[in-house]
Image: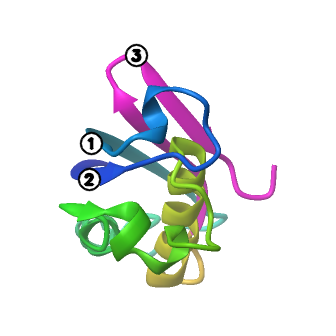
Amino acid sequence: MESEFSAAHKLRGYDGDCERLHGHNYRVAATVVGEALEDSGMLVDFRVLREALSSVLGELDHRCLNDDVPAFGSGGANPTAENIARWTAEELRARLPRSVRVARVTVWESERSSAAYLPGW
């Protein structure tokens, strides 16, 4: 399942342009896995997955990640693509049925720059 959000951030402790406030139009892909299908033949209805991902990314959309999202605020994780992917995976897991496991979340900051988080890897 793929979705997008727009946000600003600055990377703490980074020696370069990205240390200054800037923004991205992020693209996010989430892959889920499970051991058994429902009677319908689905692992999870795409509508359920889409709503869960939308709920998670809604907490990031049109925000300054450093200031508006506690997980990335002062003393929190640096809002790198890697940490955004990890946070998204953790938040998504909490919104999905227990029979569904988040296998991978990939976050693109641009068409050519992405990072993936694989829980449990």
The earlier-in-sequence mark between 2 and 3 is 2
Label 2 or label 3, whichever lies nearer to me, is: 2
Please, what is the three-letter code of the amino acid marked with disc 3?
Arg
Viewer-closest of 93 and 39: 93
Q: Residue at x 61, y 30 (%)?
A: 15
Q: Are marks 2 and 3 in contact (CB under 8 Å)?
A: no
Residue 46 locus on image (x, y percent)? 28, 62
From what the image shows, is residue 50 above or below residue 9?
A: below
Q: Residue at x 34, y 45 (%)?
A: 21
From what the image shows, is residue 116 above or below residue 10?
A: above
Please, what is the three-letter code of the amino acid marked with disc 1?
Gly
The earlier-in-sequence mark between 1 and 3 is 1
Task: Identify the residue under disc 3.
Answer: 112
Viewer-closest of 14 and 107: 14
Kindly report the distance in space between the C-alpha atoms of the residues bearing marks 1 and 2.
6 Å
Q: Which mark is residue 89?
A: none
From what the image shows, is residue 79 above or below residue 59?
A: above
Query: What range of the chain is rendered magenta?
Result: 101-121
Q: Is 73 positioned to the left or the right of 27 in the image?
A: right
Task: Identify the residue under disc 1.
Answer: 23
**Label 2 Cα neighbours within 10 Å, binned few <14 / some 14-19 / many ≥20:** some
Residue 61, visible in the rendered structure: no
Q: Are marks 1 and 2 in contact (CB under 8 Å)?
A: yes
Task: Identify the residue under disc 2.
Answer: 7
- Could you tell me what secondary structure mostly forms the magenta stretch? strand
* Membership of 103 in magenta stretch: yes
Q: Secondary structure at mark 1?
A: strand
Residue 81, visible in the rendered structure: yes
Viewer-closest of 34 and 27: 27
